[in-house]
Amino acid sequence: MQISTSKGAERCYRLIDGGCEPHRELDAQYSSLDDAIADAIAWVEPITESNHPAALIGVEVSTTKGGWRTCRMPGPLLCPLPR
């Protein structure tokens, strides 16, 4: 999928899974990196195991030529909190 962007246009972000593919459950385009990460954290929070494969989420940013570039490799978004 390619995104049409003009020079100086706003970038958009999308979440990717552990295999660096567009995330199946979080298949959306976000206007900011913060929005993308916030949505991913809210989605992954219920997963109790930090090493669960679904907990590996990365981010891609749209390029001016309509493609995608990885700006955060898939990895855990949350670390276990001490109890």
Image (cartoon, rainbow, N blue to C red):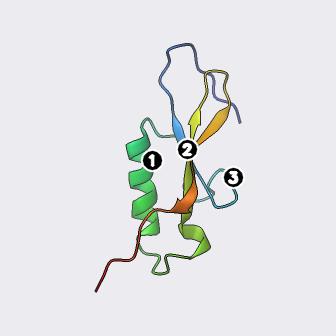
Q: Position of residue 47 (x, y in %)?
A: 47, 76
- Residue extending farthest to the left is 83
Residue at point 58%, 69% (across, down): 54
Residue at label 2? 14
Q: Position of residue 77 (x, y in %)?
A: 45, 62
| Residue 21, numbered circle | 3
Tell me the quadrant of the picture where the N terminus can be found: top right
Residue type at mark 2 is: Arg
Crowd band around label 3 with a 10 angstrom C-alpha radius: few (<14), some (14–19), many (20+) = few
- Residue extending farthest to the bottom is 83
- In the foreground, 3 or 55: 55
Residue at point 67%, 21% (across, down): 65
In whole angstroms, how far apart are the C-alphas of marks 3 and 2?
Answer: 10 Å
Residue type at mark 3 is: Glu
Q: Secondary structure at mark 3?
A: loop
Residue type at mark 1 is: Ala
- Dot placed on the residue nearer the N-terminal end, 1 or 2: 2
Q: Position of residue 64 (x, y in %)?
A: 61, 21
Q: Secondary structure at mark 2?
A: strand
In whole angstroms, how far apart are the C-alphas of marks 1 and 2?
Answer: 7 Å
Residue at point 45%, 64% (across, down): 43
Residue at label 1? 36
